[in-house]
Amino acid sequence: MITINTILIRKIDLKRIGKSIIFMVLFSYLVSWLSSILKHSLVMTMNLPMRILFDLFGICLVSLGVSMYQRVNWMLHPADDLMQIVRFKFFNGNSTKAMFAVYLPAIIIVAITFLISHQIVAINIGTILGLLFQGPMIGICDRICFKRLKHHNLGH
């Protein structure tokens, strides 16, 4: 994704690339730590409707976080940087369209592999809910939460 981001902004920005790598490493450790905690938590004993609600709550929190840190734009995960580049370069700031456009290659790959194998692996309810709701939720959070934060320093 860092390569795609570099191509889209038409500039090799070593500072941006370095920050993306640092973010990915730190984020990986955080996700690993949180998943080990959640594996042994109450979440795993919840019934399906409660787990779906928990997923929706998580998507709302992630959307709020992405909304805030994209506007600050100090250090982004390459996927969130890609969504922001696409959002403002091609979709006039529309987070829903940008999120769908960023997910589209993965959706196409899943569809092709399904046609070949007749199986869908690692696509769960949370993935589908994220696809449907994360983009719109980011846009809602942009308008409602921390209104003083503005998108800036987009680098394209």
Image: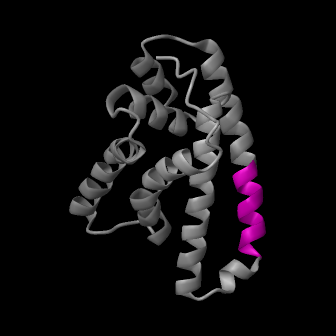
Q: Name the magenta segment's main secondary structure.
A: helix
Lateral position of residue 110 relative to residue 57, left or right: left
Q: Nearer the viewer, residue 96 or 107?
A: 96
Identify the image quadrant of residue 24. top right
Lateral position of residue 84 relative to residue 92, left or right: right
Q: Residue at x 62, y 13 (%)?
A: 14
Residue 62 vs 78, above or below: the answer is below
- Stretch in magenta: 30-40
| Image location (x, y in percent) of residue 91 | 33, 34
Residue positioned most to the left = 115
Q: Residue at x 75, y 50 (%)?
A: 30
Identify the image quadrant of residue 19. top right
Lateral position of residue 76 relative to residue 25, left or right: left
Q: Is residue 64 magenta?
A: no
Q: Does residue 145 show up?
A: yes
The image's colour scheme reads one colour
Q: Does residue 122 show up?
A: no
| Image location (x, y in percent) of residue 86 | 39, 32
Identify the image quadrant of residue 55. bottom right
Q: Residue at x 58, y 79 (%)?
A: 51
| Image location (x, y in percent) of residue 54 | 61, 74
Residue 116 vs 13, above or below: the answer is below
Q: Nearer the viewer, residue 107 or 115?
A: 107
Q: Residue at x 32, y 46 (%)?
A: 104
| Image location (x, y in percent) of residue 92 | 35, 32
Residue 78 vs 95, above or below: the answer is above
Q: Is residue 32 magenta?
A: yes
The total number of labels drawn is 0
